[in-house]
Image (spheres, grey):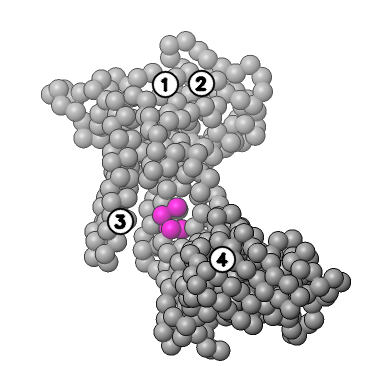
Amino acid sequence: MIVTEYELRANWYRTKEKIITLPPGSVITPSARDFIRSKGIDVRIEGNGLHQTVGGPQCIVPERPREKVHLNSRGVKPEHMTHLNQKALVTKIHPVIAYRGQLDLFQCELVETQVYFEQVGEKELILKLEEIATFARALMVHEVKESPFQWKTLLGLTPEELRERSHHPQKYYGVEHTPLSYTHGLVVAKLQHLRAKSREVELYANRAFTDILEECTRTDLIQALNRLSSAFYILACEVRGRKNEETSPKVEKQEKLVPIGVSNRHIHLSMGDLVALFGENYALTLQKELSQPGQFAAKEIVTLVGPKGSLEKVRILGPLRKSTQVEISATDCYKLGIKPVIRDSGQHAGTPGLQLVGPQGNVELESGVMVASRHIHLNLEQALEWSLKDGDRVRVHIQSKRPIIFEDVLIRVNEHYHKEMHLDLDEANAALIDGQSQGVLMEV
């Protein structure tokens, strides 16, 4: 017997009774349950002992006794009844039977959606819906067998992850919670339809397995159905996010361009060597400022003398340094008769030496002569923008009349630096560098 709000309300207004006695197996609709609470009515259930409330609006209803099998005179199941399980027949309006029917209908609509997805080439979604179909069939089996329904993941997500992602689609899929719109497309509409249908199945499950005290006997099924609707919403958000990516204007990746400076042979002097070459109390004379702030080319020049030759008029760069450093090309090394050794600036270990000749004296260097590592100067902001730090090494594609890729280019970072790549004369000549040439950073 199904007890509706209308029947209860009519009986109560006629009798004003605070106690209502119902036959065994009565099913009270949700709205009727709310009416019972609002009026403080006590409910009594007949059969196998009498149960009633003791004050207050809530009702204590015993577990409904299992329906007995009712066969007609010929021993055949009546047409208006069906099997609830192997031991019981119930009428076809029984809430559990209604729930099973809705679950069947849901699975039919699931397959229809898969057929449509096959027509439009949504192969990945077909596979995901097949996983959901397996999930739904398991729901039916465990309900009929009255066994616990246990599961760990659906679509690769735990129950907690399904809930989290369905509540925060912007975070995970780049879309906001918005009402369904025709602009979302038919694929999204189909998924949202399945979501609505799964929620309807959940509603029927609640009616079937929740008693008058709002205590549920199959919380496992209810939770699974709730997460099932979350799964469909997640799939719809994934499709919407994918569609947004496809329709959004493509943002071209900004190239990391750097101007190129050619560094001819030069020398950095220490104070002691400056005095030895030019005399006491001598100071360098500014000829021109260089691209890097604080550095300049001096008017002063020296001669480099090696085992096999010499190079005259080698420019001194300022300011003075702690140790003297000579930076020349590999070609210069061969002319001087010394072995080319590539080093980062300041790293003198293992480098050769030579003789410096100045107007007031000579200096014998034991080390400090190098082919300087090709490098790029960046200030702090530029390095941050390109996600680089001092000491990183990158590849640079030189855009010139003779394009070339330079490997192992050192990154040097200082708050005062100006963005520029430094190549020596050999490297610049190999790439035919001119005023229009520039470098493009390729990778760290």
Q: Which residue is mark 3?
A: 124
**Secondary structure state at the residue bearing disc 2:** loop
Mark 2 or 4: in front is 4
The amino acid sitting under disc 3 is Glu
Give the mark, 3 or 2, whose residue is nearer the N terminus. 2
Where does residue 155 sit, x and y in percent of width and height?
37, 45
Residue 339 location (% of width, % of height): 48, 64
Dot placed on the residue nearer the N-terminal end, 2 or 4:
2
- Above/below status of 269 relative to 5: below
Mark 3 vs mark 1, CA separation in Å: 45 Å
Q: Is residue 407 depicted above or below 22 in this figure?
A: below
Query: Is there CB contact under 8 Å for labels 4 and 1?
Result: no
CB-based contact (under 8 Å), mark 4 and mark 3 = no
Can you identify the residue that label 2 sits on? 61
Residue located beneath label 1 in the image:
64
How many angstroms separate mark 2 from mark 4 (CA)? 95 Å
Camera sees residue 218: yes
Marks 3, 1: nearer the viewer: 3
Work out whether mark 3 precedes mark 1 in sequence or the reverse, and give the earlier one: 1
Q: Which part of the image, by quadrant, shows the N terminus?
A: top left
